[in-house]
Image: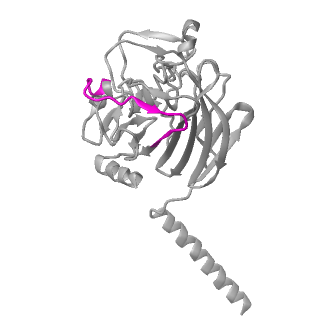
Amino acid sequence: MMKLLSKMAAVFLFGIIAFAACNNQSGQKKDMQVRVVPIENEQRVDVLVDNNLFTSFLYTDTIADLKKTVLFPITTAGGNIITRGFPLQPRPGERVDHPHHIGLWLNYGEVNELDYWGNSNAIPASRFNEMGVIRNNKIIECKSGAGEGILEVEDHWLKPDQSVLLRENTRFIFRADEKSRTIDRTTTLTALNEKVHFNDTKEGMMAIRMARELEHPTNKPIMLSDGHGDKTAVPVLDNTGVSGHYLNSNGVEGMDVWGKRAKWVSLSGTIGGEKVAVVIFDHPKNVGHPSYWHARGYGLFSINPLGQRVFSKGKEHMDLQLQPGESVTFHYRILILSGDANADILDKRWREFAK
């Protein structure tokens, strides 16, 4: 009798396991483990999804071209890198312009007449007093979990004399499932001891520098990286594998999205055989919403709510100012979706974010 009951229990348990497996195959999403791991001796925080690198928060001051904190590299659910490698990890066949375009970052081109956007090791020493840098002050929180991880940091926007102009508090929420990766970025900038003026310029604000495969095809000569990471002039361009295509929330496509207002912009293409759509969502509480976009065909994918004069051809202007102690907060979502994504799907995703 006991043997019979044991057999029945084993059959019952096997049935439960088989049922759960079938249910998972029929469309249930698996909770993926998102680990946020500080590597203090290398001044970075790794974000891992099931032990595979999603991205890293880099805050090192030992890399010459890194004049700000960045997320680099950024990978898809399929394991393909969507960010350009140059100048930190150059790959053959990618552009070598704008060395200040690294990974995903947030800064601005004219803050109290200092350029935080264009600073890199390519800037001559004679212009040092025109440039600002952004350095991490402390890592506040690293939290791992099923499907979601959190990183909270405090950065300082420094003047050339190393005094602090702005305190930045940024909270990243990293999410992952089998078909997507998501980064929610909430950044609060606080003026400290003096009035802070964000002069109206197109050079800003939150941006990603995309891999060559996600650029728009072009017939113009450019400089590319060779197999050794050196710069090589290419007078006749090979667009093999270059498949990027912009679409915004108002139906504007291609390079015409530049200088237009939109709730979201998507950059879709194929990389490593994987169809992807990289989408930036603008939150309705943000200054200047719906924002103007500084999105270029050569791989600069940027949202700029503060630089309205250039985009509107002088009809509008922003010139945001903060008095000492005042703050401004920006909320953005970056969705990296594997597969096709049409406007209806992305409108629904934006509404979810806007809530």
Determine whether, in the image, residue 192 is placed left or right of residue 248: right
The furthest residue to the top: 126
Task: Tell me, yes or no, whether the highlighted magenta stretch contains residue 111.
Answer: no
The residue lying toward the viewer, choosing from 345 and 320, is: 320
294 to the left or right of 95: left
x%, y% of residue 301?
40, 31
Q: Measured from the top left, where is residue 4 in percent x and y? A: 68, 89
Task: Name above or below for residue 234 compared with residue 270.
Answer: above
Residue at coordinates 35% horizontally, 37% vertically from top-left? 291
Res 345 seen here: yes
- Return the x and y of residue 354 as percentages of the image width and height: 39, 52
**Where 224 falls versus 82 (above or below)?**
above
Q: Which residues are magenta?
A: 310-331
Residue name at image x 30 percent, y 46 percent: 342
Q: How many marks?
A: 0
In the figure, is residue 334 to the left or right of 194?
left
Report the residue that reaches farthest toward the bottom.
Answer: 1
* Residue 89 in view: no
Q: Quadrant of the C terminus?
A: bottom left
Instruction: Tell which of 141 and 156 is nearer to you.
Output: 156
Is residue 321 covered in magenta? Answer: yes
